Amino acid sequence: MTHAEKAVALFKEGYNCAQSVFLAFEDMYDIEHDTAMRLSSGFGAGMGKLREVCGCMTGAFMAAGLLCGYSDVTDGEAKKNTYAVIQKIAGAFEKEKGTLICRELLGLKKGEDLEEPAVRTEEYYRTRPCASMCGLAAKLVDDYVILGR
């Protein structure tokens, strides 16, 4: 199963978008599952259901950071390279989807849909683009981090 397929499957199991993308790469980094779940839990639905930056993107950014990020704050070249990878992932997603903003991807107005998390029904999965966006985000991590495009 590809990381993109895994991200879609995780979303359809009930994980939020950020968790779905971040956990799709769980086999590639040394973090306990519970820690990975908790770390990525607040980024779903555009950062805590604020409908800001798409959770698929934040999940992808977290995965990319673990896979190719820097840990030496004095290493300017590593920082520059990490940011370049993030910008490539974001740029490719935005080119494909038109925006990185959750509410715009879902056709919502600012402040709309801030209540309880949606109940996942067949209708939800049929009408929301989130599962396919999880797959796209994971594919972009593969493209720009794993394959080094």
Image (spheres, rainbow, N blue to C red):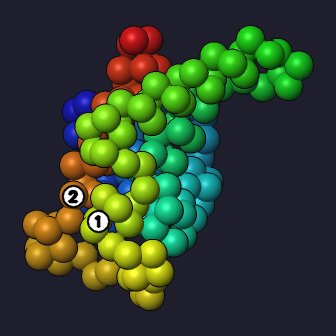
Label 1: element kind: helix
Q: Quadrant of residue 144?
A: top left
Q: Can you identify the residue that label 1 sits on? A: 106
Residue drawn at the location 47% of the way across and 40% of the way down = 60
The answer, for residue 101, to whether it is visible in the render is yes
Q: Position of residue 99 (x, y in %)?
A: 37, 48
Evaluate if marks 1 and 2 touch, with contact meaning CB atoms under 8 Å apart.
yes
The vertical placement of 136 against 118, above or below, is: above
Neighbourhood count class around disc 1 (C-alpha, 10 Å): few under 14, some 14–19, many 20 upward: some
Which disc, if any, is residue 139?
Answer: none
Residue at mark 1 to residue at mark 2: CA–CA distance: 8 Å
Question: What residue sits 44% from the left and 88% below the top?
Answer: 115
| Residue position for label 2 | 129
- Residue sitting at x 28%, y 82%: 119
Amino acid carrying mark 2 in the image: Pro
Residue 42, percent from left and from top: 57, 65
